Amino acid sequence: QVQLVESGGGLVQPGGSLRLSCAASGSINSPYIMGWYRQAPGKQRDLVAIITSGGSTNYADSVKGRFTISRDNDKNTMYLQMNSLKPEDTAVYYCNYRYLVLNRVSWGQGTQVTVSS
């Protein structure tokens, strides 16, 4: 079982930046996909960005050019650098790990991001 803990959320003004972190512990096996999702009040949880064990990345159209997903394998930590934040980016952000061989999925507890002036 993989445990995930997010951090780095908070209140930021429009146009500002935040960096989210997702610390992973436990048995992290490859091949895997790790990702960031977000859920705004009253809405479904949507994919924001993913990174594979091979290093490939993909982004939702709404965040392309503004958000960057990365990882530090030595620290077992995934990051989401968020720039040029907009009010519509306000949501709870969750990190996710999926072990592709057995389709095992883990979720973090979420971190709130609020973009407001």
Image: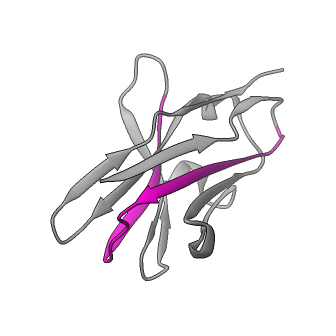
> The magenta stretch spans which residues?
15-39
The quadrant where residue 71 appears: bottom right
> Image point 41% across, 16% down: which residue?
42
> Image point 46% across, 57% down: which residue?
25
Colour treatment of the image? one colour
Q: Name the spot of residue 117 as percent of width and height, x first.
A: 84, 20
Query: How many labels, in total?
Result: 0
Q: Looking at this view, is 2 or 33 the one in front?
A: 2
**Is 37 covered by the magenta stretch?**
yes
> Image point 43% across, 83% down: which residue?
54
Extreme residue in the bottom direction: 54
Q: Is residue 48 above or below residue 14?
A: below
Extreme residue in the front direction: 26
Q: Main secondary structure of the magenta part?
A: strand
- Horizontal side of residue 104 vs 66, given as left or right: left
Q: Name the spot of residue 80 as percent of width and height, x first.
A: 63, 54
